[in-house]
Amino acid sequence: MAIEKQKLILISGIILGVMAIVMTKMYLDQQQQAVQERAKAALANMRSNQTAVLVAKQDIPQGTVIDAQMFDTSIVPNKFVQPQAVTSLDRIAGMITVAPISKGEQISLSKLQPDRRSRSTDLAGVTPAGKRAITIVADNIASLSGMVRPGDYVDVLAIVPIPMQGADGRVTAQTSVIPLFQNVLILAVGQNTGGAVASTGRYSESAPSSASSAGNVLITLALGPQEANLIVFVQEQGKMRLVMRSPADAKVEPMAPASWDTFFNYVMPKQEMAPVVDTNEYIEVLRGLSKERVALSQ
């Protein structure tokens, strides 16, 4: 009996020890997960308050044609970002410096202008390396016709029906506006490439009239290979709109799709309502088999 009792105590001790190890591991895992979540939140907050800008790797004299080897990317707090700071090399491809740029200085559009020595009118010649020229018909181009030019930058919005499942299980299509691409270069408007993309757009004094197809002006954009595939898919599924950007704005920021839900949340934000507390006192009055509640007068 004594031996069996010792065995029982030993087994109980082992079980308790294993349980302690398991609980300790669970606690440590929870702590590690909490630390990781806090680190992710801190990183997201830090990123939202910083911007990646281009800075000069060397002194760049006036009259120098822009080359990718001249720049580095630097992460800068938003409050230290210079006016018209360049965040994308695509934005300044083919430009030339109109003022000296010092080593370590942020690249600003105010010190750059198109290189008008380039006069290529060939679409392939004005398509940046790594990009694809894709032509679309934007439904709102009638309102932009005569104002949008090669060399301008736009955002592309897609208007497509999104399948949504309702509470009754039925699937219906809800029209949504999705921010597709931002800071996209316009290569051509109709047949007009503007001589060279870099020598036209908002930097030129005039632009030839653009050609149209069936009353719609065609817009040719510079997109990456995968982006070109996506925009062709969207053209088959819905419509597109173009939104003009400022020449000094190259920032790409997250944007939420727009639908009826986001529309009503914007115009009529949901507010938490305080629960209604009924402060009146009642008494119950029996009238035959019925019961009534009668409020006491204050």
Image (cartoon, helix red, strand yellow):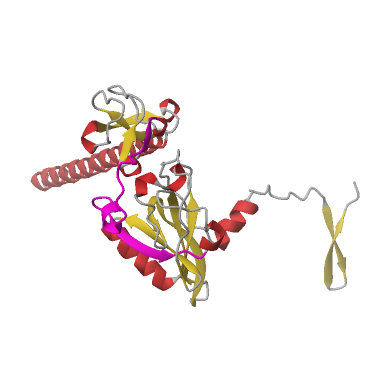
Decide whether residue 134 is among the magenta residues.
yes
**Image: 51 above or below 287:** above
Residue 198, visible in the rendered structure: yes
Q: How many numbered discs?
A: 0
Q: Position of residue 110 (x, y in %)?
A: 42, 31
Q: Which of the 4 quarters of the picture holds residue 108?
A: top left
**Residue drawn where x is 38% and y is 60% of the image:** 220
Residue 46, visible in the rendered structure: no
Viewer-proximal residue among 173 and 273: 173
**Residue drawn where x is 67% and y is 49% of the image:** 273
Judged from this view, the residue extending furthest toward the right is 297
172 left or right, relative to 97: right
Judged from this view, the residue extending furthest toward the left is 3
**Image: 255 above or below 55:** below
Viewer-proximal residue among 100 and 232: 100
**Residue drawn where x is 25% and y is 32% of the image:** 72
Q: Position of residue 173 (x, y in %)?
A: 49, 73
Q: Which of the 4 quarters of the picture holds residue 111?
A: top left
60 left or right, relative to 298: left
Decide whether residue 122 is among the magenta residues.
yes
Magenta residues? 111-139
Viewer-proximal residue among 163 and 188: 188
Q: Position of residue 255 (x, y in %)?
A: 46, 50
Viewer-proximal residue among 116 and 33: 116
23 left or right, relative to 176: left
Q: Position of residue 56 (x, y in %)?
A: 28, 28
